[in-house]
Image: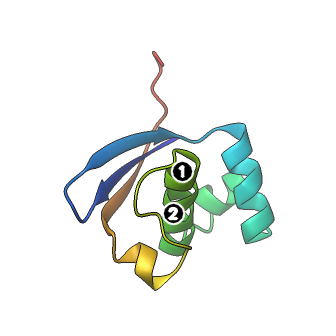
Amino acid sequence: MRLKIVRASGEETLHEITPSIEYAFELYAKKGFYRAFSEDMKMSDVYWLAWECLRRAQAPDVFPFGDKFLETLKSVEVLDSDPLG
């Protein structure tokens, strides 16, 4: 699984969901990663994943997760993993 993140500035990035990001999500959400995205997908979970990806990539203007961070996003799209990557 990958995320396509478009920031309010227009910057667009792709981020692969790695095992360490899956683990961090499960600690945050208190639920299994695959179940969360196959049976109980919430946009707040997607936005948290976007935050974690950007934070780990040391992207600029990554505020603590919450309203101020969400205002820096234009959109977040969940994509399949790159089969070649």
In this figure, what is the number of numbered marks? 2
Question: Vertically, is 52 above or below 70?
Answer: above
Task: Kindly give the residue lying farthest to the top in the view shown.
Answer: 84
Q: Is residue 72 left or right of residue 48?
A: left
Q: Is residue 71 left or right of residue 81?
A: left
Pointer 2 residue? 46
Q: Secondary structure at mark 1?
A: helix
Q: Residues within 10 Å of mark 1 (few under 14, many from 20)?
A: many
Pointer 1 residue? 53
In the rendering, at what x and y percent does residue 83 appear?
Answer: 47, 20
In the rendering, at what x and y percent does residue 63 appear?
Answer: 49, 71
Front one among 77 and 54 = 54
Residue at point 51%, 48% (across, down):
58
The answer to whether any part of residue 29 appears in the image is: yes
Distance in Å between CA atoms under marks 2 and 1: 11 Å
Q: Report the amino acid beneath label 2.
A: Val
Dot 2 or dot 1: first in sequence order is 2
Residue at point 72%, 39% (across, down):
19
Residue 65 badge? none
Residue at point 40%, 63% (across, down):
61
Front one among 64 and 27 = 64
Residue at point 49%, 66% (across, down):
47
In the rendering, at what x and y percent does residue 43 appear?
Answer: 48, 71
